[in-house]
Amino acid sequence: MEHTLASDWSTFLPAMALTLVRVSGMIVFAPFFSSTALPVRTKAAFAGVVAYLLAPLVASLPAAQPELGCVALLGELAVGLLFGLTVALANEMMLFAGQLIGMQFSFSMVNLLDPSSSIQTPLLGDLFQLMGTLVVITSGLDRVLLASVMRTFRAVPLGTYVLPPANALQLVRAASGVFLAAMELAAPILAATVLIEVAIALLSKLSPQLPVMSLTVPIKTLAGLALLTGALALWPRFFEARFSGLLDLAERLIAQPDRSFVLSPPPGG
């Protein structure tokens, strides 16, 4: 009996360590989990509990190799970081969309200290990131993210992953889709504010006495805020579709690293 108990612990502890490395790598970058508003000790405790619960299950999967080693640790860290970095592109999409709209609202010089990155970011960029985090929480996407991470243990058994160079290239290509997705999100407001600028410019030609500089900024800002308020009802669906697409991308990069991906909504999303 003592021999069986010792053999169980000799398998459980390495499996838990490797699982903890993979889960921790995801928590470092993934939306909501990476927020500095969450205490570091809370994140560490959460990762430890998840690793403790998953270790017996993932160690018993076929082809799992729960043995500590440099290659195994680096492989698990690569899986977690790749997963977290891929999903973190959703935050970058919201930040870039906020920067675009902030320029049209004449808020480009209004910066705040972003607590998650410790750098100054535009006001609307911070606002959009907070809205994205709110959608993650209210839609239960944090639980979907955890479920997706758990599925990676079946696609890539414990201690068997080796990061191929193709994954880095595919991640860069996916990052380029952030710009397109941000433009899609900001396009209605950008178009409306540009049309307002054109209309005021035409009015200034008809009436040179019109104070163009004093009218353009407030009218453009008020109209843009009104349109932004009306468009908020469609944003959760837009963000959820892109977030789900990024989850699919992360799973495909881990399981099949040779497939390409563009940041776009899934069919019917």
Image (cartoon, rainbow, N blue to C red):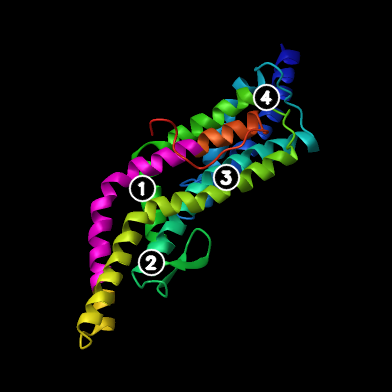
- Say above or below: 151 vs 171: above
**Which residues are drawn in magenta?**
219-245
Labels 2 and 1: the sequence-earlier one = 2
Labels 1 and 4: the sequence-earlier one = 1
Give the residue at x 42% y 63%: 100
| Label 2 crowd (10 A; few <14 / some 14-19 / many >=20) | many
For this rendering, which residue is in front, 191 or 111?
191
Question: Are circles 3 and 4 on residues that touch, CB within 8 Å?
Answer: no
In which quadrant of the rendered view does residue 144 lie?
top left
Q: Quadrant of the C terminus?
A: top left
In which quadrant of the rendered view does residue 266 lie?
top left
Question: Are circles 3 and 1 on residues that touch, CB within 8 Å?
Answer: no
* Residue at the spot of label 4: 157
* Residue at the spot of label 1: 134
Provide residue 118's location: percent of width, then percent of height: 53, 64
What is the three-letter code of the residue carrying label 4? Pro
- Camera sees residue 260: yes
Provide residue 75's location: percent of width, then percent of height: 72, 36
Single out the mark in the foreground, 3 or 1.
3
| Label 1 crowd (10 A; few <14 / some 14-19 / many >=20) | some
Give the residue at x 74% y 37%: 164
Question: Are circles 2 and 1 on residues that touch, CB within 8 Å?
Answer: no
What is the three-letter code of the residue carrying label 3? Ala
Q: How far apart are marks 2 and 4 (CA)?
A: 45 Å
Q: Is residue 71 magenta?
A: no
What is the three-letter code of the residue carrying label 1? Leu
Provide residue 218's location: percent of width, then percent of height: 25, 74
Give the residue at x 47% y 40%: 264
Label disc, if present, on residue 174 of the rendered structure:
3
- Say above or below: 3 vs 247: above
Prevailing secondary structure class for the magenta stretch in the rendered image: helix
